[in-house]
Amino acid sequence: MKPFTITFLGTGSAVPTPSRNPSSQLVKIDDFHILIDCAEGTLMQLNRFNLSPMKLNYILISHLHGDHYHGLIGLITAMHLNGRTNPLRVAGPPGLYEIIQLQLKHADTTLRFPLIFITLTEDFPQVIIDETGFSTECFAMKHRIPAWGFLIREKIVHYKIRKESIEQYGLTHSEIHSVQKGEDVITKDGEIILNKLLTFPQPAARSYAYCSDTAFYPELASAIRSVNVLYHEATFSAIHAREAKATFHSTTWQAAEVACLAGAKRLVIGHFSSRYQNIEQLRLEAVSKFMDTVSAWDGLVLSIE
Ligand SMILES: [Zn+2]
């Protein structure tokens, strides 16, 4: 099984504190590196955890509040200065490309690498990455300004064939190749041999969902049904539900509720307000409604098995 990991680079909200940077995460899947959100200081966090920005293939920006993208121009400029030539794909809300272009224009900087921009729209479902080994869809969240969530889903591309079935059915080279891609075999007599009779059972495709920032929005559940790991913001304690509602953020209980509704296997909470010193207390609030809850910290690496 190939690694599918998330490194949490920033797990606080609004402004950096000595213990937490604002939002950013690095997802590694199928040899691809995807950065989700890019708060100020993200480049420093990548350096701090020995991760190279030069390896990034994609950057996804959820919305245009500064604590989710103010590090982007610095990161792009650093890659330029370090001689990057590989294309970089950035997906983000309308307006973001204009902001980047304006910053580059006034710095009289022409990037050494192609920056390919994907504009997120409000037509759903929307596939924004479609690679051989995985895909990424975005979906709507409920925030003060338009905000998108992301679902990264592994694709099972290589089916392991049973040796004995090659002999039993006298499979040719090209038939073996089709079976390994998941296809059925049609014999000369027109009989269909189902792929599942020829191959070992496949592990279920793994998935990861990112939901930050959002108010309590139960409709999210349908977009992320049965996700393996759900990262959902929990900016506020359950006792501060009024503040959460007023600022279009979620509480611990609301994050847990979405995890229950979605049938998620595991919940990670983050985007904590700096007013809370006792994060374990926030985690326990979520645990009271959804057992398998982890509270994220800067530097946490989580592997999806
Ligand atoms: Zn926001």
Image (cartoon, grey):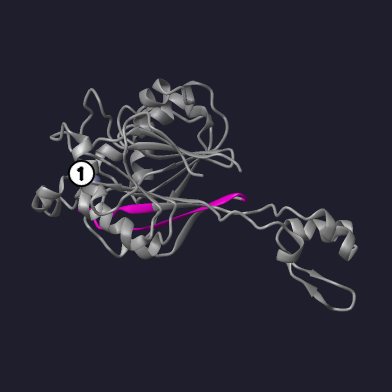
Counting from the top left corner in percent of width and height, residue 263 is at 38, 60
* Image quadrant occupied by the N terminus: top right
Measuring 54% from the left and 27% from the top, which residue is drawn there?
Answer: 84
Question: Of the residues shown, which amino acid type is indicated by label 1?
Answer: Thr
Compared to residue 188, the image places residue 69 above or below, namely: above
Compared to residue 124, the image places residue 281 above or below, namely: above
Going by the image, does 142 lie left or right of 50?
left
Q: Which residues are magenta?
A: 132-149
Res 197 quadrant in image: bottom right
Measuring 10% from the left and 48% from the top, which residue is drawn there?
Answer: 240
Which residue is disc 1 drawn over?
235
Q: Residue furthest bottom?
A: 190
One can see residue 143 in this view:
no
Going by the image, does 114 lie left or right of 272?
right
Closer-to-camera residue (96/254): 254
Res 178 quadrant in image: bottom right
Going by the image, does 187 lie left or right of 263?
right
Question: Number of callouts in the render?
Answer: 1
Compared to residue 215, the image places residue 124 above or below, namely: below
The secondary element bearing badge 1 is classed as loop
Is residue 261 shown in magenta? no
Disc 1 residue lies near ligand 1 with CB under 8 A: no
